[in-house]
Amino acid sequence: MPTDAALTMEDERIKTEPFVARLMKRPELGAVGGVILVTIFFFITADRSMFTLSGIMNFLTPAAQLGILGIAAAMLMIGGEFDLSIGSMVAFAGMIFGALTVNLGLPLVLSIPLTFLFAGLVGAANGWIVIRSGLPSFIVTLAGLFILRGASLVGLKLFTGGSTQLRGVREAVEGDFLTPVFSGDAFGFVFNWLASVGLVDTFRSGLPKVPGIPVEILWFVLVALAATYVLLRTARGNWIFAAGGDRNAASNSGVPVNKVKISLFVCTACAAALVAIITVIDSGSTDARRGFMKEFEAIITAVIGGCLLTGGYGSAIGAFFGAIIFGMVTIGLTYTNFDQDWFQVFLGGMLLIAVLFNNAIRKRVTGER
Amino acid sequence: MTIDTKFHHGDPVTHAPIVEMKGIEKHFGNVIALAGVSFDIRPGECHCLLGDNGAGKSTFIKTMSGVHKPTKGEILFEGKPMSFSSPRDAMEAGIATVFQDLAMIPLMSVTRNFFMGREPKKGKGLFERMDMDAANDICVEEMRKMGINLRGPDQAVGTLSGGERQTVAIARAVYFGAKVLILDEPTSALGVRQTSNVLATIDRVRKQGVGVVFISHNVRHALAVGDRFTVLNRGKTSAPPPAATSRPRSCRT
Ligand SMILES: Nc1ncnc2c1ncn2[C@@H]1O[C@H](COP(=O)(O)OP(=O)(O)O)[C@@H](O)[C@H]1O
Ligand SMILES: [Mg+2]
């Protein structure tokens, strides 16, 4: 990943900082360290099969679904706002998507953009209310959390004639040319070839045990790369950091703070819609509990990834690794002899460590003592 | 404009005011922050705005820089009536402001702060991106011109001293072609050495033909660099002490 530091010119006037000192200031440092620690932990405690190809795909899949939300939450948090409604937004977008494909029978080429449009509009409304009212986004989107969850329930009953689960999505999207983009496994032919030359494990039939890379993992990587590019290499990225760092300073310097913040709310809503589309096609149905508690998990991912709750600091790559930690812990415990219910204890502990660590890092960066 | 370090009072041909403000009033609800203030600034001069805390100095320059709309009064920019609806408008016209709270973000690097809101771009369409190399080079070079050697362009502004931060803010304004540079109490939080650095920077900037509006409640700092003086008192201009209205430049230290 390119970093600002990597672009530093050689200049005899500049005292060069030691590489380690510079590394210490990267916001994603904690998350990378966390991945290493968690990996070591599971290497010692978990069954060997966790780190086989299929084991890795096993924990990367939930990591990817959460990570897409987490990266969007991280960008929003860098921009100085929260969105507690993303979990409910997954259910809401899932409901919209289900109704469009099943009830209206629209092809994906229409239903997917329409789902994004609906989600984006709700996101824009969230942002607009936050900006207009000047209220903390925490409280505005907390209202959104309940409104969207409730609306999903009501909507599902309406579209199914009384059920809270809308089925038949898989049948509706079967054969659609866009289905492989949002579901199933990609690069199957590569894995078949790897299996044929004996590089990956196979079933007795000769088929590879891992049929390909689940598409959500590719989306996850794509979202992480795009977010990192925007944050570190574009003017908009600079505006996001500025808007979250100090909105007055930013707007006095000519940054369109309100537009930036509203766009970020639209992005989180669209990330939720993407996760909804992927998971709804995957399971073939949607229900009102979809995305339950994901808002908190996404925020935890962003914080483990190095975002400050006060805004203006953080990284998308950090959130990427934060989500991987999350996936490893959730799935990894099933490979160990520990009681799986340790999961939440683990999670809370990590959040606490991450927050303490980030606070220390911030002081280093600003030279505060 | 030509390099002319001599200051001529009221020479209308070469030194017409860049900004002229007439009878500016600003009310915040029932608080009358400004009750009719007139002021002008010409190229290459340092016009000091003096007054106690709460006199309305910050409010006044905020109407000049597009943050506030005046309740009443007229603003002429290069002779034409002008109404800025945002700081961005004013900035694009050439009025740059270094606010009292500096408009600087401690967690961001010097380069990112320097170019905040006006990032150099390269590439087209979807591939349009910030030209980080150019930004870093320009930033380091401009800061060097102002006498500050950065540890690196990615050094966070939070690690700079107060005087250095002022200098970054001034360098940024000058780099982006300010015709008028407004400094709101740039020296109020600084030590002696840092203050003299900032005053020297003001002098350097003025010599480039920029009109500097220097706000201070410290008369000694104002006398050190000022060419003209306006005193604000409870939202109104009061007559400055005669000795201070105009000073020959040679007396400056
Ligand atoms: N946004 C605002 N709303 C209400 N009153 C304000 C606002 N800004 C400034 N004032 C009032 O206007 C007066 C002048 O303030 P200010 O311009 O900051 O003074 P100075 O910069 O000279 O110390 C003060 O009494 C202040 O309380
Ligand atoms: Mg003031």
Image (cartoon, rainbow, N blue to C red):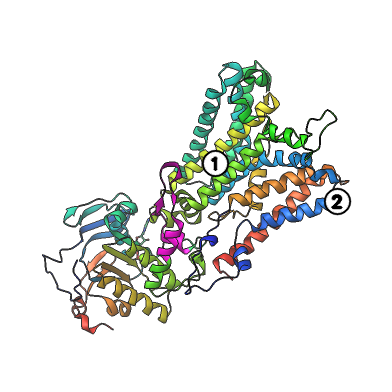
Q: Mark 1 packing: few (<14 Cα in 10 Å), some, or many (20+)? A: many
Which residues are drawn in magenta?
A: B110-139
Q: Please, which chain is the residue tagged with disc 2 on?
A: A
Write down which quadrant ligand 1 falls in: bottom left
Q: Is residue A125 left or right of residue A182?
A: left
Amino acid beneath label 2:
Thr
To which quarter of the image does residue A222 belong? top right
Q: Mark 2 packing: few (<14 Cα in 10 Å), some, or many (20+)? A: some
Taking the image as drawn, is residue A340 in sight?
no
Residue at the limit of the structure toward the right, as seen here: A337
Q: Is residue A327 above or below residue A171?
A: below
Which quadrant of the figure contains the C terminus of chain B?
bottom left
Q: Is residue A161 above or below residue A279?
A: above
Residue in front for this viewpoint, A221 or B212: A221
**Residue placed under numbered mark 1 in the picture:** A140
Amino acid beneath label 1:
Val
The label shown at residue A45 is 2
Q: Please, which chain is the residue tagged with disc 1 on?
A: A
Taking the image as drawn, is residue A102 in sight?
yes
Q: Residue at x 41, y 81 (%)?
A: B193
Residue in front for this viewpoint, A247 or A320: A320
